[in-house]
Amino acid sequence: MAWIRNDLASLPFPAIPAFPRYFPPTTMLRNYLKIAVRNLWKNKVYSGMNIVGLALGLACCTAIGLYVVDEWSYDRFHTNFDRIYRLAEHQKQADGWHDVVVTPGPLATALRRDFPEVAQTLRIKQWGGVLSQGRQVAEAEHALIVDPTLFSLFDFPLVAGNRQQVLRSPNDLVISESMAARLFGANWARMGIIGKPISFNGEQAFTLSGVVKDPPVRSHLQFDVLLPLAWEEKNDEWSQKWSSNSYHTYLLLNTDRVGTSTNLAAFTDKLSHQLNRYNGDSTTTLFLQPLGDIYLKSKFDFQTDWGKRSDILYVRIFLAVGLIVLLIAVVNFINLATARAAQRAREVGVRKAVGATRISLIAQFLGEALLMTSLAVGTALLLLQSLLPLFNDLSGKQLSIPADEPRFWLMLAGLTGLVSLLTGLYPAFFLSSFRPARVLKSTSLSLGLSVKSGQAFRQSLVVGQFALAVGLVIGSVVIYRQLAFMQTKKLGFDKSQLLYVRMKGNLRTKALTFKREIEQVPGVASAAATTSNLVDITNSSDVEWEGQRADDKFLMTQMNVDADFLKTTGMQLATGRNFSWRIPSDTSATLGAFMINETAARRMGWTPATAIGKRIKFWGPTGIVVGVLKDFHFRPLRVAIEPFLFRFRPDNPYFTLLVKTKAGASMPKTIADVSKRYSQYERNSPISYGFVDQELDAQYRAEQRTGRIILYFSILSVFVSCLGLFGLATFTAESRTKEIGIRKVLGASVASVVVLLSKDFLKLVVIAIVIASPLAWWAMDTWLTDFVYKIQLDWWMFAGAGTLAVAIALLTVSFQSVKAALLNPVKSLRTE
């Protein structure tokens, strides 16, 4: 450090008392600023490319940062956030062990009784229905059946009603503010609505006991109606049995007993075998899921884990993509700054000769980097403000710049400082390292050779940024191919032109009559009454079958259908026959008829042929297998096909009508005709309908969102990479102007000059492709492991992405190469 002290002592201005050896005076800071502005203005093209590249990288990184913060903020507004857990089961199913988030109804009470570590419990179950108050009717989109402890575990504020008393009576009802506005009007708060009667599904009369504030967007629990669990206990005995998994069960732990990770691990171990204690299930174990993991880290089936949720994998992907784009922009800055070092070498030499120290030069160049980064940050904020609606559309969020939050500006200031260091540190040390004597007496050629010492570093940066860009392009190709595969794969039934209509209220018991009415609509080919639309199937239970071993158990998913189900959906029989109205045993209440899929037959030890005539006991009644259906996909392609059972129970309520429309029929007119007939049967509830193919595609919304974001960001990363490549090509052409002139005088063609200037850059891009391909293969192969049914990673995906990168790079470099090759050689040779 002696040379630093000697250099500082030779500074031509008096030392500052506070920090005499390290901090430059105000006059020098002002001079640094003047020099930085002059350099920016003198090199407008390069400055513009640097600022635009950095601004794009910073805008992307900031947008991703807002997204990540939003995702991580879920459920953290609850006071007891760190003490709340949700119970889940690790249970044996048909194809192995699975984690399931639904639990038996009696479990919550048993846990409070058996474990002092449990302070409170809460059970929640999803429900649905229509509310009516006088002439006003509103459908509950998110109705939940809950314990009254909901308001002591979670911080959902009541705006009307007594927090300690609501939901304790079987006739209590709590609605959200938005539901209150729908039922009572915008001025409901002034009307004294507490105590008003509200009808649910046209049957049950409830008394309004509270109005709760609409749940925050960042809550995994969303609801507009809360029904008391005491009401279900009174009306549904089955849901309160140990053999029925019906509820999400939450625990509030007592910190006096579970205050450390060791205590929590001990409690979890004691808890795990609780089901064996009460229902003799020695295989299924319980485990705890922290509240903070529910939204981002749940891996349960969407049909049973119905709460709002995302995936930590995609948060990590988005974060990585944002950092990659920012890194590419930073690399551009470093590349252009070091490449243009020759133009500032003599400046450095002169400054050192008149007494400037290396540390003062480093401070100057870092200050220039800070100025450029600050300009880029300002530009990035303008870009972010204008492009945030597009990003919100891609991400499915409602993000905005949190201008009123000091934390945002502190983080932005920190990001500005970090990027300034990343972009300015290497150029500052590189430029300040020039020796005055060598620089000032060097010819242009020898000076060029001294600057060329940083060429290997610049080349490695070009390789790195193009490797990242090519990796993103390959990722986009693979994701879109997997999406196309999932959306076009044959599912085992015909999802096209398949409409579903929700049947509500009394229509559920008149479903077959309504079905015959719908079959008369001109645009309808066939219709079938069912209990589900083939997408949101949630009913499963234990099954007993002929020849079952005592230790062999699994859950079977089921659905009630009528005899026209196969005709309407296009499902195919592997063997056996369909249900029939003409065969009395099919509709018998004591010994009915079942159809199963091929997977169910194999799971029970049968072939499709030997399964016919076998007996199955499911949910009480015993049935005879009359047909085996070819396997079909009713879950996302991430999971394997599961055992499935169809029941023919015409005397039971149906909740859905599947309608197959005729080819070429006008869909709007058909829907209008169906709606008209619906209103004739059910006047109290508005019609709800949808299309099966759209519901199936919606299962892959996360993959679609990820694919779109990576596609846009990969385009952006390629653009930013080419921006830097363009700058380097421009600089190379300028520095070799005299060489190009000599070559042309000696007879070189324009094409040979273009090849000369382009080949070195193309070599770097090819090397980047070679590096990116195996890394992208590993990343995409890892991503595809989440899917049981998936595409193969073919060579053409990598070759196509590489060819695209080479073509874009060649186009970028060729522009400057052709421009330099066409320059008059006489003019080139006169240039000094």
Image: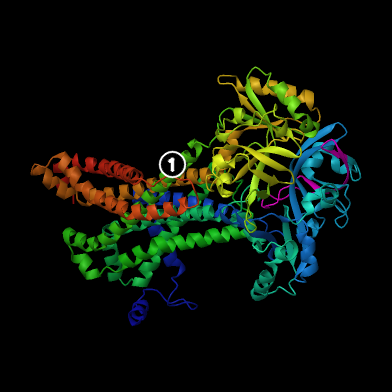
Q: Residue at x 70, y 58 (%)?
A: 77
Amino acid at the residue labelled 1: Arg
The part of the image, by quadrant, that contains residue 613 is top right
Q: Measuring from the top left, give residue 527's x and y in whole percent.
A: 66, 26
Relative horizontal placement of residue 418, taking residue 805 as reference (left or right):
right
In the rendered image, residue 201 lying in the magenta stretch gets the answer yes
The residue carrying pointer 1 sits among few (fewer than 14), some (14 to 19) or many (20 or more) residues within 10 Å by Cα, namely some
Q: Residue at x 77, y 51 (%)?
A: 239
Residue that mark 1 sits on: 481
**Quadrant where the N terminus is found in the figure:** bottom left
In the depicted view, which residue is nearer to us: 278 or 65? 278
Q: Residue at x 59, y 21 (%)?
A: 662
* 656 in relation to 745, above or below: above
The part of the image, by quadrant, that contains residue 669 is top right
Q: Measuring from the top left, give residue 287's x and y in whole percent.
A: 65, 64
- Residue 672 visible to the viewer: yes
Find the magenta span and give its range. Answer: 198-226
